[in-house]
Amino acid sequence: MHIASRWKTPAVALACGSLILTLAMGVRHGFGLFLAPMSLDLGWGRESFAFALALQNLVWGLTQPVIGMLADRWGGGRVVVAGVALYCAGLYGMAHATTPLMLALTSGIAIGTALSCCTFSVVSGVIGRRFSAGQRSQALGIAGAAGSFGQFALLPASEYLIGALGWHNALLALGAAIVLMLPAALGIVESREGPAASTGSASARQALAEACGSRDFWLLSFGFFVCGFQVIFIAIHLPAYLLDAGLAPGVGVKALALIGLFNIFGSYLAGRLGAIYSKPYLLGGIYIARSVVIAAYLVVPLSAASTYLFSAAMGFLWLGTVPLTNGIVASMFGVRHLAMLAGTVFLCHQIGAFIGSWLGGYLFDSTGSYRLVWWISIALGVVALLANLPIREQPVRHAARPA
């Protein structure tokens, strides 16, 4: 019997892919809450933990094109199963880390690679192949909203587990939650010949060479670089920025949870609008809107109320870039190699994430303030707008196209 059974409809693939993103992204977003208790108990400086998370983002980006190529070749479900094993091993090792090196190997390398297997590029590749061009953007938006729901739901859950069980047992409990991704992986298993048979004949090498020779592909990638810089700088440094200003510690947790909540609506709406309007124009609008929101946040007096308003607005603009960016890649190059090519664009996102995380700490240590990094984020949003406007959302001449 063929692996692609009748019950594995596009709706089932979307539901299962959304559950995978909810768990994978939700657990990952809570890692910052472990910084203080682990550093205190283990007697390390914060730099060790911060480096491990920065390494996680970098490994996630570096491995994503290769993992995406494997998912395009063997199907996303099989790759997710491997990712679950790596994720659980990484969380177990993180809970038992006794040296900064061990923490870097587990939370940095193991979990970074696992995220490549279980998140947007792989899941988007499956969903992109299961839905028609007219429905694809909306389906990707729903999946992106699911990843945002994970941030909203599991961030407070992680905080509760740390308080109730301690950080060691909290990590083990999160590992048990990750196992729930295994039955969901069955819903996105593809036949080995399925992806290749249904979407064209270009090889992975040809598709990658074609993408790298496209000006529009690099403009799109630069925009995603800016996305990574902005969102990771805020996700990593916003709680510390608020503490430095004298606000209560709970404000930072609530702010990040609000970002996740409003990102649900923003990602879904971006997917819906991407099916109707120009995706490059929508992307440019998101980037410039982020700059406006950040600038407004800096000029008004800082308070819990202004932070919550900022988080709601920024959350609405947070990951709506993902369905639009992946939708453009599918429109330009087809869906056979979507996971690999989306992973290549995502590598640029993670390079931006690494720089945003590191530069925030470096400039704070150098100047005693985050203000310069905030203004760099604003300027990059303007540049990202200009980069996205000339992108042509049309098939590249020799790209592998959907059947």
Image: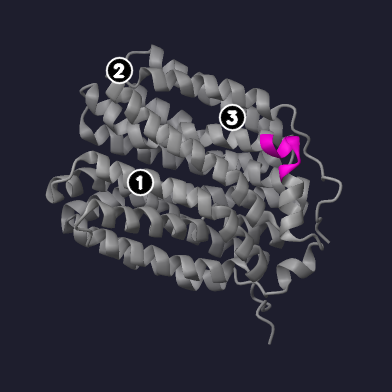
Residue occupying the far bottom of the picture: 1
The residue that label 1 is drawn on is: 53
Q: Is residue 382 above or below residue 211?
A: above
Q: Quadrant of the N terminus?
A: bottom right
Rounded to the nearest angstrom, the CA distance separating label 2 from label 1 is 23 Å
Which disc is residue 367 wearing? Answer: 2
Q: Position of residue 376 (x, y in %)?
A: 47, 21
Amino acid at dot 3: Ile
Q: Is residue 83 above or below residue 161?
A: below
The residue range painted magenta reads 212-218
Dominant SS type (magenta): helix
Q: Is residue 336 left or right of residue 183?
A: right
Q: Position of residue 264 (x, y in %)?
A: 50, 44
Amino acid at dot 1: Leu
The residue that label 3 is drawn on is: 286
Q: Nearer the viewer, mark 3 or mark 1?
A: 1
Amino acid at dot 2: Thr
The answer to whether residue 173 shows anywhere in this view is no
Residue 216 in the magenta stretch? The answer is yes
**Along the viewing direction, whichever of 383 and 309 lies nearer the viewer:** 383
Q: Is residue 108 above or below residue 243?
A: below
Secondary element under disc 2, as helix, strand or loop, is helix
Which disc is residue 309 wearing? Answer: none
Residue 287's image quarter? top right
